[in-house]
């Protein structure tokens, strides 16, 4: 079977994620994995999904989103609420986790759709401004939202706790205190499966008729419109898909900690994810995966530097940026890739 | 040049993977707290004071401690990462986390891993509820709110009170709620109740004007010192001079860089530690802290100092040695802490309930001539 360049890269991405998962499982199974790395596996999965989903908006659709953490927040709060509310209804933890991720994704998609309706009709950088504001609004909403559950169903109030729960009821979202006492049901395998699903969805979307339309909109909007592509429709498709994935990532992330607050998903988190995307290369999913994993581990690996930790983190970032943009190194990688392609072509023709 | 870059990169990676060397025969105490970022004053105070206490205890011979403190930037995710790093290091006893929300996250971990934790300063209730091996050296937040209302009423400081609080902060909200619950019963009338949050913590003119126009004689500020410093500055500019009343988060306002400490003159705060106390132990601690770090220690520092000494007392009483596992130590510590009485800088005759909360009495303080002075 001859593969074109894109599918080869896609399969390489799948392969790297699978190999990383298998290696981690083997090392963890042998008990050689440090607690530090073990504790980071689920957040890494969540950040990888965040990075690839943002890359769909920024790299493939070509729109700048500065509020991706907002969708993560929606997913985290809604997914966790679902997980807590269904604690008795669904005793099986993996099933409850799945439901939580789906709930998180659906709510984030709905919110993404609502944000997209006015904004994606506009040209220019409006999406960046609106998503920036959106991230802040979501943060405020969850900081003032009280949501509880009792025998009569779900109660909700804003600003003050007016839920008046019955005896035996449980306040799930407690305004600024966020959600506490979460049962940690997220695990590495679930994170891995989520990454794979997101990669499959993105690669298939990009390689489809719709994906080509999305990229046509990115490359030249006027030309795309002139051949009859509905610009808003395709923008919406990419944006909502991206939001849904971020929602699932948020639910996964939240269910890995015993407590979650809205302030965690602030502007800094949005920028952090954007850094993963830029670092890995716009439109380059494999790059996003690697960048998200590496940049999540890096600050922890630098702990032995104590006070100089964040300084060195910044220096390492700059050095890697310089190194990856270095013409000599680029040439080296290009020649390596060329050799790899030739070899595989030879093999392909031989078989 | 490229080679230099590459070399530097390799060096950085190698250093990162090197584990720090440690001494044998010492019980390993680990803790996390914000050493960088907005809440760094608390984390640094705890770290510094714990270091002093460990040095003193080690110098005495007998029980030997080794302390490692990791940065969590006041974030739950980072706190769990820092905790896991400490676990890899071989931590046997934990001092939890310095701030509330991160401590709630790490306490779930220490509970699951059966590592005993006594937090110096994480005051939210959720930190200790339902976890038999989690204890607090500080008051819980609700305690502070009702104690403040009680104090204001007892000392007849004011009858018309304004409250400015941060509605997206666990700490602020916890204190606010119990204050509001206790105030009416004590004859305090809350005339103005205004909020702010993380995103708009720079301009307080609306809140100050509201308190001023409604004639509040006292403004209760259940918040950390950074926002409080701005409120004091802006109220002074607006010509409003009520009695200011803060809780333990106000502690640290005098060491805030760039803040005109004359604005804090006459501010009341309710905190269990008073650096001007005549008590011998406090004097010695304050002198040592000042000599080493050039600052007057705040309440967080005193709590951390007490935590290490409480550990020393408990370890000695239970005969804990460095070769015991964390689980063994944990069981013995729970037994000790629920039965022992501890005298420290932040109170005499402290005891702990089985739910992990401490019993001690708060002290009222007022800021005079740029220093905290005890009232009682």
Image (cartoon, rainbow, N blue to C red):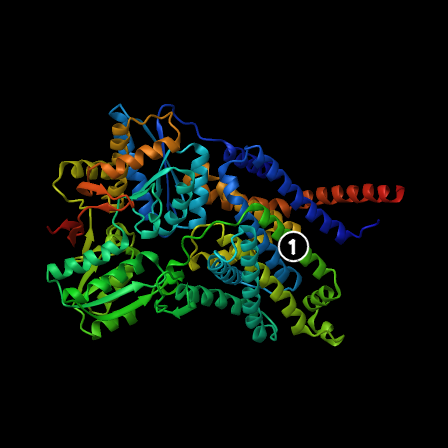
Q: Describe residue A170's horizontal placement relative to residue A198 as left or right.
A: left
Q: How many circles with numbers are drawn on the protein?
A: 1
Relative image position of residue A293 (x, y in whole percent): 57, 46
Dot 1 falls on a residue whose secondary structure is helix
Q: Which residue is drawn at 75% across and 76% down?
A: A228
Asked if one can make out residue A126 in the rendered structure from this viewpoint, the answer is no
Relative image position of residue B20 (x, y in whole percent): 44, 30
Q: Residue furthest right?
A: A350
Q: Describe residue B168's horizontal placement relative to residue B2 as left or right.
A: left
Relative image position of residue A165 (x, y in whole percent): 36, 66
Q: Which residue is drawn at 72% across and 75% down?
A: A225
What quarter of the picture does the N terminus of chain B occupy? Answer: top right
Q: Describe residue A311's horizontal placement relative to residue B187 as left or right.
A: right
Asked if one can make out residue A271 in the rendered structure from this viewpoint, the answer is yes
B206 vs B15: above or below: below
User: Residue at label 1?
Assistant: A197
Q: Residue at x 36, y 52 (%)?
A: B38
Judge by depth and name the residue closer to the eye, B96 or B252: B96
Using the image, name the chain to which the residue with label 1 belongs. A
B315 vs B363: above or below: above
């Amino acid at each position: 079977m001859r593969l074109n360049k894109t599918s080869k890269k896609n399969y390489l991405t799948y392969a790297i994620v699978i190999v990383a998962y298998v290696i981690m499982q083997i090392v963890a199974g042998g008990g050689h994995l440090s607690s530090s790395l073990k504790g980071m596996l689920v957040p890494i999965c969540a950040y990888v999904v965040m990075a690839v989903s943002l890359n769909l908006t920024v790299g493939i659709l070509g729109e700048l989103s500065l509020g991706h953490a907002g969708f993560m927040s929606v997913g985290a709060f809604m997914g966790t609420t679902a997980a807590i509310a269904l604690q008795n209804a669904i005793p099986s933890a993996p099933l409850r986790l799945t439901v939580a991720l789906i709930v998180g994704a659906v709510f984030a998609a709905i919110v993404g759709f609502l944000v997209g309706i006015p904004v994606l009709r506009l040209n220019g950088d409006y999406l960046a401004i609106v998503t920036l504001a959106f991230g802040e609004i979501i943060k405020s909403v969850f900081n003032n939202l009280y949501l509880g559950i009792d025998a009569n169903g779900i109660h909700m109030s804003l600003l003050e706790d007016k839920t008046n729960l019955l005896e035996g009821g449980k306040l799930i979202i407690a305004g600024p205190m966020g959600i506490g006492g979460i049962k940690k049901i997220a695990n590495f395998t679930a994170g891995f499966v989520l990454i794979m699903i997101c990669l499959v969805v993105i690669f298939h979307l990009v390689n489809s008729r719709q994906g080509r339309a999305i990229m046509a909109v990115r490359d030249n909007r006027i030309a795309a419109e002139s051949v009859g592509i509905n610009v808003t429709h395709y923008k919406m498709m990419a944006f909502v898909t991206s939001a849904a994935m971020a929602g699932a990532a948020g639910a996964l992330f939240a269910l890995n900690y015993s407590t979650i607050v809205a302030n965690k998903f602030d502007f800094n988190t949005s920028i952090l994810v954007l850094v993963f995307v830029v670092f890995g290369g716009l439109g380059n999913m494999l790059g996003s995966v690697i960048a998200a994993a590496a940049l999540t581990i890096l600050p922890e690996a630098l702990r032995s530097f104590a006070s100089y930790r964040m300084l060195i983190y910044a220096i390492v970032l700059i050095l890697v940026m310089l190194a990856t943009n270095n013409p000599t190194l680029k040439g080296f990688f290009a020649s390596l890739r060329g050799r790899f392609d030739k070899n595989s072509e030879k093999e392909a023709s031989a078989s | 040049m490229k080679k230099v870059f590459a070399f530097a990169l390799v060096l950085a990676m190698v250093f990162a993977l090197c584990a720090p060397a440690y001494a044998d025969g010492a019980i390993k105490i680990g803790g996390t707290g914000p050493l960088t970022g907005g809440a760094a004053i608390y984390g640094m105070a705890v770290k510094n004071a714990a270091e002093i206490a460990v040095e003193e205890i080690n110098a005495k011979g007998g029980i030997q401690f080794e302390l490692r403190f990791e940065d969590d930037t006041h974030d739950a995710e980072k706190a769990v990462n820092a905790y896991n790093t400490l676990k890899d290091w071989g931590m046997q006893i934990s001092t939890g986390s310095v701030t509330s929300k991160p401590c709630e996250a790490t306490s779930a971990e220490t509970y699951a891993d059966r590592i005993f934790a006594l937090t110096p300063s994480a005051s939210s209730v959720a930190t200790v509820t339902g976890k038999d091996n989690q204890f607090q050296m500080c008051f819980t937040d609700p305690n502070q709110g009702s104690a403040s209302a009680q104090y204001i009423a007892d000392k007849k400081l004011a009858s018309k009170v304004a409250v400015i609080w941060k509605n997206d902060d666990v700490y602020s909200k916890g204190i606010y709620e119990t204050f509001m619950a206790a105030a009416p019963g004590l004859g305090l009338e809350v005339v103005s109740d205004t909020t702010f949050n993380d995103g708009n913590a720079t301009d307080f003119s609306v809140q100050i004007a509201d308190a001023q126009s409604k004639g509040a004689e006292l403004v209760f500020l259940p918040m950390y010192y950074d926002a409080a410093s701005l409120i004091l500055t802006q109220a002074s500019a607006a010509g409003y001079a009520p009695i200011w009343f803060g809780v333990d988060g106000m502690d640290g306002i005098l060491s805030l860089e760039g803040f005109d400490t004359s604005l804090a003159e006459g501010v009341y705060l309710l905190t269990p530690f008073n650096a001007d106390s005549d008590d011998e132990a406090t004097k010695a601690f304050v002198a040592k802290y000042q000599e080493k770090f050039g600052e007057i220690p705040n309440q967080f520092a005193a709590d951390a100092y007490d935590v290490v000494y409480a550990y020393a007392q408990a370890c000695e009483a239970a005969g804990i040695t460095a070769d015991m596992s964390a689980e063994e130590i944990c069981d013995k510590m729970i037994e000790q802490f629920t039965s022992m009485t501890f005298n420290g800088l932040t109170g005499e005759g402290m005891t702990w309930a089985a739910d992990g909360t401490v019993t001690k009495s708060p002290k009222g303080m007022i800021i005079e001539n740029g220093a905290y002075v005890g009232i009682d």
